[in-house]
Structures are given as structure tokens and as C-alpha cells.
């Protein structure tokens, strides 16, 4: 039996599909979210894609020798990340996730609308206690 060596290495653009796959397969409280939303890209577009696009130098993958099978992503400056998300990520996905229609503050009607509402509020990531850290 051949021994497989896994390594943690920096993210590469060629890892995009694998990172999205891992994200959607773990996006339902650690379980598989495929088929839960109108698009299987919704959760990765909100929770993995912006990090690998905006902060690729802080994205790493677990590579099993064939492909990325896990990842760790982050940002050293959450406030700057939230600003970049609004300025660069939301416009990039505007055709997929148009902003909610202005009107009375009704709660989202379904899980897709709930996630898309989060997408349009990146400032939610900035918590007051982060500035003290």
C-alpha cells in the first residue's frame, strides 16, 4: 500500500474548485449543504471565495498529493477585509446576488434570501472587541 503524504501549503488559484467543494460539503453545520440553496456556490461565495480572492496570502490548503482536501483562511485586518468585500467582492458577484429590493425591513423569506442578505452586509464581520485585540 502506497503511503500518502499530506501537506499544508499556500493556496493557488488552481485550488479554487476544491476549496469551493470542501466549503459546500461542510457548510451545513459541518455537514453537506449541496442542494440546500439555489446554487451550491452560494455558501462558498460568501464564506471561502472572498478570502481566497481578497486575501490569498492568508489562505492555505491541506493537499493530499492529488488535490486540496481542506483549507484554512483568514484575514489579519477584519475591518479592511469588510471594506474590500463591499468594494471588490460584492460588485464581482452582482449578477449572481443582486441587492435586496429596498423597502420595509422584512425578514428574509427563505434560506437563500437570508444568506444573500448576509452577503450584502459585510460590516457584520467587524465586532467592536476586534479593535482591542
Image (cartoon, helix red, strand yellow):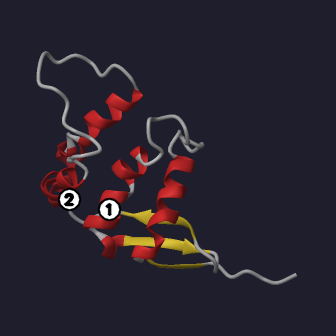
Q: Is residue 16 left or right of residue 130?
A: right
Name the foreground residue: 36 vs 48. Answer: 36
Q: Could you tell me if residue 4 is visible in this image? A: yes
Q: Quadrant of residue 83?
A: bottom left
Quarter of the image with the C terminus is bottom left
Looking at marks 2 and 1 on the same chain, the residue that comes earlier in the sequence is marked by 1
Identify the residue at the far front of this view: 95
Name the foreground residue: 67 vs 3. Answer: 67
Q: Is residue 112 above or below residue 30?
A: above
- Can you tell which mark lies on residue 7? none
Q: Are the residues tagged 2 and 1 within 8 Å (C-beta)?
A: yes
Question: What residue sits 44% from the left and 35% below the top?
Answer: 38
Q: Is residue 45 left or right of residue 70?
A: left
Q: Could you tell me if residue 11 is visible in this image? A: no
Question: What residue sits 21% from the left and 47% below the top?
Answer: 94
Question: What residue sits 13% from the left and 15% below the top?
Answer: 104
Identify the residue at the far right of this view: 1
Q: Which residue is mark 2?
A: 81
Q: How many marks?
A: 2
Q: x%, y% of residue 88?
A: 17, 58
Which type of secondary structure does the marked residue at label 2 adopt?
A: helix
Which type of secondary structure does the marked residue at label 1 adopt?
A: helix
Q: x%, y% of residue 123?
A: 17, 44
Q: x%, y% of residue 41?
A: 43, 49
Q: Which residue is mark 1?
A: 51
Few, some or many residues within 10 Å of mark 1 (<14, 14–19, 20+): many
Few, some or many residues within 10 Å of mark 2 (<14, 14–19, 20+): many
Q: x%, y% of residue 17?
A: 48, 64
User: What is the distance, in whole Å, between disc 2 and disc 1 at their CAs?
Assistant: 8 Å
Q: Is residue 110 left or right of residue 36?
A: left
Q: Is residue 35 left or right of residue 66?
A: left
Amino acid at each position: 500500500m502506497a503511503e500518502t503524504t499530506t501537506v499544508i501549503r499556500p493556496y493557488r488559484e488552481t485550488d479554487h474548485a476544491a476549496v469551493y467543494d470542501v466549503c459546500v460539503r461542510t457548510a451545513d453545520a459541518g455537514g453537506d449543504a449541496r442542494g440546500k440553496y439555489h446554487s451550491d456556490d452560494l455558501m462558498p461565495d460568501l464564506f471561502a471565495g472572498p478570502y481566497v480572492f481578497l486575501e490569498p496570502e492568508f489562505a492555505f490548503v491541506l493537499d493530499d498529493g492529488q488535490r486540496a482536501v481542506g483549507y484554512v483562511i483568514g484575514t489579519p485586518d477584519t475591518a479592511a477585509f469588510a471594506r474590500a468585500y463591499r468594494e471588490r467582492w460584492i460588485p464581482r458577484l452582482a449578477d449572481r446576488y443582486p441587492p435586496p429590493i429596498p423597502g420595509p425591513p422584512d425578514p428574509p423569506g427563505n434560506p437563500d434570501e437570508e444568506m444573500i442578505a448576509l452577503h450584502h452586509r459585510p460590516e457584520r464581520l467587524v465586532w467592536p472587541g476586534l479593535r482591542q485585540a
